[in-house]
Structure formats: structure tokens, C-alpha cells
């Protein structure tokens, strides 16, 4: 059985393509291209189910076209649209062998302050301008909006999916 703590969110299936069962994965992290797993995990109504791929190719820097084994028609591919996609943590390469290729890859990371207090989980990253914005969900359920700058970063772990920030005084008070 696949447990939620063994995987991390990498995107969602945005649509199906053609009649041969291909889908489009709108991804926030290209771990499937860097890691060793030959499968992705799809949340099927609360159950994490592995789907093995036959092949994949990139449509652009945020979308991959994937052909899963045993999904051979648009009928079955349509059933996957809208579902969240995860990647197994154990299949990531060693931390020193990879780096973040997109700001959106921080989606799902736990953000802490310099004292180790959890500020929240990154739900979305706006990288459409020169100013990177992290949208977090705090432990009490509130949305926090934090501008990101390299000077704020004190530590991070790609494998643990954590970021530690030293934020200017008063920045959290404006939320």
C-alpha cells in the first residue's frame, strides 16, 4: 500500500489526447524525468494507485504527454483527467545530483522560519513576473502570501522537501 508520506505532489492530469489513451500531465516538478521510478502515482478517490508508463515526451516546460500501460483508449484516459499525480520519494536521485529547474517545483514543500517553526505548505508559486510569490497554507488553515528572494533562504532540502527562510520583521504581519 502506498502511503501519503511516501510520495509528493508533482501535478495533475489536465486532459486526454487522441484516441490511443495518452494524457497530458500539467506538472510542477519534473521528478519523473530525473528519478528512477517507471511509474507515477495517481490519487483515485483517496487511494494512491501506481500507473506504469510506456513512454512520455515533453510538450513544453510545464506539460508532459504520457502513455500509460493498459490505458489504450480515450474512454479510460478521460477517467484520469483532473486527478492529482504524485511521485515516490524513494525514487528521487541523491540530493547533490539534481537541482530545482522551475520555481513551481517548490509546490508541496514545507516552509519553516529560522527557528524551525512551520509557516505552511507551498500550495502555489507565481513565477509570472520577476517577483516570485509563494502561496502557503498555514497549519491553522490560513493562506499566507510570501514574496521569495534568495536573501531570505537559509536552508533547504530537496529530498525532505523543506525550505527554511529568514523573513524580514513584519513581513508575515501583512498577511
Image: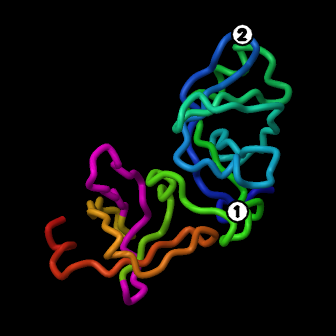
Please tell me how crowded label 1 is: few (under 14), some (14-19), or many (20+) other residues with Cα within 10 Å.
some
Could you tell me which quadrant the C terminus lies in?
bottom left
Could you tell me which quadrant the N terminus lies in?
bottom right
Determine whether, in the image, residue 27 is placed left or right of residue 146: right
Q: Residue at x 38, y 89 (%)?
A: 115
Q: Earlier in the sequence, mark 1 or mark 2?
A: 2
| Residue 168 shown in magenta | no
Give the magenta part as a residue range: 114-137
Q: Which residue is mark 2?
A: 19
Q: Is residue 91 above or below residue 158?
A: above
Quarter holding residue 42: top right
Determine whether, in the image, residue 9 is placed left or right of residue 143: right
Residue 120, given in percent of the width and then of the height, sits at 39, 68
Determine whether, in the image, residue 140 is placed left or right of residue 62: left
Furthest-bottom residue in this view: 115
| Residue 125 shown in magenta | yes
Residue 25, given in percent of the width and then of the height, sits at 60, 34
Q: Residue at x 65, y 49 (%)?
A: 86
Quarter holding residue 154: bottom left
Residue 144, given in percent of the width and then of the height, sits at 28, 63
Identify the element where label 1 is drawn.
Answer: helix
Q: Residue at x 80, y 35 (%)?
A: 53
Q: Is residue 112 above or below residue 127?
A: below
Instruction: Point out which mark residue 89 bears.
Output: 1
Q: Is residue 61 above or below residue 148?
A: above
Amino acid at each position: 500500500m502506498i502511503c501519503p508520506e511516501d510520495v509528493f505532489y508533482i501535478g495533475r492530469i489536465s486532459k486526454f489526447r487522441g484516441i490511443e489513451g495518452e494524457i497530458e500531465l500539467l506538472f510542477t516538478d519534473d521528478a519523473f524525468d530525473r528519478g528512477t521510478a517507471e511509474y507515477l502515482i495517481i490519487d483515485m478517490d483517496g487511494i494512491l494507485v501506481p500507473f506504469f508508463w510506456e513512454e512520455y515526451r515533453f510538450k513544453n516546460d510545464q506539460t508532459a504527454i504520457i502513455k500509460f500501460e493498459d490505458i489504450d483508449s480515450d474512454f479510460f484516459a478521460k477517467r484520469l483527467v483532473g486527478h492529482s499525480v504524485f511521485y515516490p520519494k524513494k525514487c528521487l536521485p541523491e540530493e547533490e545530483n539534481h537541482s530545482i529547474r522551475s520555481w513551481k517545483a517548490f509546490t508541496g514543500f514545507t516552509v519553516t522560519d529560522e527557528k524551525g517553526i512551520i509557516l505552511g505548505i507551498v500550495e502555489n508559486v507565481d513565477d509570472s513576473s520577476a517577483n516570485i510569490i509563494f502561496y502557503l497554507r498555514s497549519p491553522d488553515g490560513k493562506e499566507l502570501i510570501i514574496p521569495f528572494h534568495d536573501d531570505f533562504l537559509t536552508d533547504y532540502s530537496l529530498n525532505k522537501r523543506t525550505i527554511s527562510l529568514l523573513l524580514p520583521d513584519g513581513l508575515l504581519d501583512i498577511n
